[in-house]
Amino acid sequence: MKNKSVGLLIIGIALIMGFLVLLFNLGLRNIVTQTCGHGSECPMYGTIALQTYIGLGLTAFIIVVGLFLIFSKPEEKIVVRRIKEKKKKLNLNGLDKDEKRIMELLQKENGGMFQRTLMEKLELGKVKVTRLLDRLESKELIERKRRGMNNIVVLRH
């Protein structure tokens, strides 16, 4: 159910409850009038008044809750869509043999690895790998990110 419908339902129930409290109050007053010999100063009248105020107070509180539900905005649904990112097929044309090996290794390693690990897997020297990475970076195929004393080599998307 929507908030407005629930609010109206609660207010309707509260009004019925308030009507019943007032009827009960009237019935108790008639009984006390007939049975109490002290007249209008009978202590039972004070008890009836207290019970009536409590009943009407609860009724008023329930009406306020109903009004709040009527005038409050319903919760908005948040829809999150996950878009599957398509992996681009990298164009390896125009690359030499070692550059292609680097690109293939990076693709196998989910797009990134440490430069030192890359050197070890390629079994090439530090200077050779640095020059190869410089060329790939100038072609905007990879990106090097500094991490402490080492670089992380990642594919550019």
Image: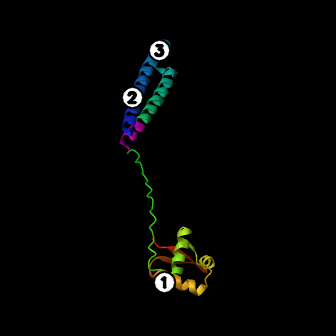
Q: Which residue is mark 2?
A: 15
Give the amino acid type for the residue marked by disc 1 in the picture: Arg
Residue furthest toward the top? 34
Taking the spot 44% from the left edge, 21% from the top edge, the residue there is: 25
Q: Nearer the viewer, residue 113 or 47?
A: 113
Number of residues whose C-alpha sits closer than 10 Å to that of mark 2, classed few (under 14), some (14–19) or many (20 or more): some
Residue 114, position as x, y percentages in the image: 59, 75
Query: What SS does tag 1 mark?
Result: helix
Q: CA gap, disc 1 to disc 3?
A: 102 Å
Query: What SS does tag 3 mark?
Result: helix
* Quadrant for the C terminus in the image: bottom left
| Residue 127, label in figure | none
- Image quarter of residue 56: top left
Q: Which residue is mark 1?
A: 135
Q: Which residues are magenta?
A: 64-72
Number of residues whose C-alpha sits closer than 10 Å to that of mark 3, classed few (under 14), some (14–19) or many (20 or more): few
Q: CA gap, disc 2 to disc 3?
A: 24 Å
Q: Which residue is mark 3?
A: 31
Taking the spot 38% from the left edge, 29% from the top edge, the residue there is: 12
Question: Per the image, is 16 magenta?
Answer: no
Give the amino acid type for the residue marked by disc 2 in the picture: Leu
Q: Nearer the viewer, mark 1 or mark 3?
A: 1
